[in-house]
């Protein structure tokens, strides 16, 4: 190997040249990385809600990358579901800023209660919150209902439902956020249901990259009257959905305790109004009249035998006459008598058998006393609710999720109840599970049952409910997704 001598000037020049060649590309690479970082998603942009739409419209706010702009937390890898995934969801829900926000949502709704199919401001508030989170939705369904979507847009599809309507009750609870609408009150906890589902939406949106499918959020009007669920289904709320879940607050359990059962949970419910017609006459000469009071009295007695002598004693059923109106003239046998009441059963077969037998008892007993009878079951007014029946697999899913979140001792198997819920219409179409979440807190005075003017809730339930909804949906997609 030979060496060629060079001058000191040339050596200095050569050194500078090498330095420039090496440093310049490194600066270019650094600039490229910085530029790439500048293109990361920005924080959510807040904007006003859309105006009320006259036909269902899709408001598409989904990010193509499914990268959440909600910076509530740093998500761990839940590609393999563990209890830590459930704990992470609960920790997010219990963050101070999240709890403060979800309580504020519930209080706004509570202050402005709206009756069935009149939930315009409630629906507007929900849409505003969805838009802040850049969650796409369809609106309106069933007048004020909303169908929101989070996830990949691909199967499987799982739904969570909250009812929005209030009751025509004057609130008797004196507190800062008492109802501002005279004669209307959220006396059944639907304001809490909405807040919990919006809270779940925020969690799910932040964890969207973990979702192995699609979550549908159903904000439904008119559970209390009008069978809003039936109209939501008709308007496409369950499109592509293969399973659905919903919660209801309950004073039967301490705050945060979750309860449910497999099979029939709530009864089917129907109402009737019957008119028995005879011939009016002076009470002093009854032989000149045809007495509908006597016929109606016989009907009331005979109706009781349907349950006591025709139904299985182990299969609970109810027939109750709650109104008997023959007028107020003390000296005249009336032309007609009007009777009203309700009937309940835990299976669809038994429910419609009760309906059939009630009609027969009215018409046949009336004829025995030379009267006639007509019976109205209000079928054209959607007042018939089928039984709410939990699918066993979906019930086990709720039990598993709840046990992870609140502990096995805080999940209770509950007995069936004679109350009714229009969630039953969803459970007739697809596998479903309905569960209770406790709000009983005697120290706060949260002890009164639903439909009471003294009804109130322990707001500590809100983050627990939000986490439960979110975990049910995310874990469902993990276990049933591809």
Image: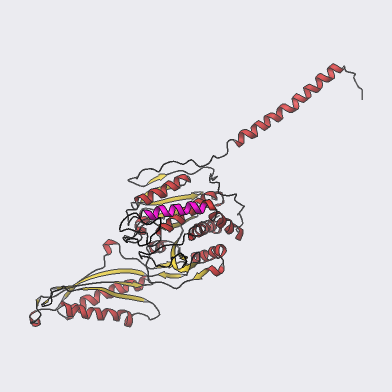
Tell me how the rendering is colored.
secondary structure
Q: Looking at the image, can residue 215 be seen? A: no
Q: Is residue 99 magenta?
A: yes
- Relative to 269, is 37 above or below? above
- Between 259 and 386, the one nearer to me in the picture: 259
- Between 64 and 193, the one nearer to me in the picture: 193
Say which quadrant the C terminus sits in: bottom right
Say which quadrant the N terminus sits in: top right
Measured from the top left, where is residue 433 in percent x and y?
A: 46, 64
Rendered residue at 51%/52% (across/down): 98
Measured from the top left, where is residue 271 in percent x and y?
A: 29, 69
* Image side of residue 354 versus residue 432, left or right: left
- Relative to 465, is 411 above or below? below
State the extent of the magenta-drawn residues as a range.
98-115
Q: Main secondary structure of the magenta part?
A: helix
Q: How many marks?
A: 0
Instruction: Identify the image quadrant of residue 342.
Output: bottom left
Measured from the top left, where is residue 389 in percent x and y?
A: 42, 68
* Image side of residue 90 versus residue 262, left or right: right
Q: Looking at the image, can residue 109 be seen? A: yes
Rendered residue at 48%/51% (across/down): 101
Measured from the top left, where is residue 316 in percent x and y?
A: 38, 77
- Relative to 205, is 373 above or below? below
* Image side of residue 230 versus residue 254, left or right: left
- Between 66 and 199, the one nearer to me in the picture: 199
Rendered residue at 24%/75% (across/down): 360
* Image side of residue 53 versus residue 33, left or right: left
Q: Is residue 386 magenta?
A: no
- Between 54 and 168, the one nearer to me in the picture: 168
Instruction: Identify the image quadrant of residue 18.
Output: top right
């Amino acid at each position: 190997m030979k060496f060629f001598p060079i001058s000191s000037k040339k050596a200095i020049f050569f050194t500078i040249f090498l330095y420039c060649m090496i440093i310049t590309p490194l600066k270019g690479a650094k600039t490229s990385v910085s530029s790439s970082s500048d293109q990361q998603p920005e924080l959510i942009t807040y904007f006003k809600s859309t105006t009320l739409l006259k036909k269902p419209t899709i408001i598409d706010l989904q990010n193509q990358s499914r990268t959440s702009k909600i910076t509530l937390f740093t998500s761990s890898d839940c590609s393999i579901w563990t209890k830590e995934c459930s704990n992470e969801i609960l920790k997010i829900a219990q963050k101070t800023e999240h709890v403060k926000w979800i309580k504020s949502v519930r209080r706004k709704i509570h202050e402005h209660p709206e009756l069935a199919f009149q939930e315009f401001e409630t629906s507007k508030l929900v849409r505003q919150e969805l838009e802040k989170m850049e969650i796409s939705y369809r609106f309106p369904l069933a007048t004020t209902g909303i169908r929101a979507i989070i996830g990949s847009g691909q199967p499987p599809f799982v739904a969570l439902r909250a009812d929005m309507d209030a009751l025509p009750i004057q609130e008797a609870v004196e507190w800062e956020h008492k109802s501002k609408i005279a004669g209307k009150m959220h006396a059944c906890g639907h304001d809490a249901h909405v807040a919990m589902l919006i809270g779940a939406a925020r969690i799910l949106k932040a964890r969207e990259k973990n979702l192995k499918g699609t979550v549908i959020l159903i904000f439904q009007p008119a559970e209390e009257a009008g069978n809003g669920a039936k109209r939501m289904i008709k308007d496409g709320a369950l499109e592509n959905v293969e399973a659905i879940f919903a919660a209801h607050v309950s004073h039967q359990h301490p705050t945060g305790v979750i309860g449910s059962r497999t099979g029939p949970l709530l009864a089917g419910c129907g109402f009737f109004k019957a008119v028995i017609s005879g011939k009016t006459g002076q009470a002093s000469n009854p032989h000149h009249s045809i007495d509908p009071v006597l016929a109606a009295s016989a009907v009331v007695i005979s109706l009781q035998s349907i349950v006591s002598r025709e139904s299985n004693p182990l299969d609970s059923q109810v027939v109750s006459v709650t109104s008997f109106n023959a007028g107020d003239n003390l000296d005249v046998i009336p032309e007609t008598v009007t009777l009203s009441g309700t009937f309940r059963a835990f299976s669809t077969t038994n429910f419609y058998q009760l309906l059939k037998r009630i009609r027969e008892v009215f018409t046949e007993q009336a004829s025995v006393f030379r009267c006639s009878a007509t019976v109205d079951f209000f079928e054209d007014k959607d007042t018939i609710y089928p039984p709410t029946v939990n699918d066993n697999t979906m019930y086990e899913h709720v039990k598993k999720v709840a046990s992870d979140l609140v502990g096995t001792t805080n999940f209770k198997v509950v007995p069936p109840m004679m109350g009714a819920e229009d969630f039953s219409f969803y459970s007739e179409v697809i596998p479903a599970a309905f569960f209770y979440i406790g709000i009983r807190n005697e120290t706060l005075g949260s002890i009164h049952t639903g439909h009471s003017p003294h009804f109130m809730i322990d707001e500590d339930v809100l983050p627990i409910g939000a986490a439960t909804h979110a975990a049910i949906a995310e874990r469902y997609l993990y276990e049933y997704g591809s």
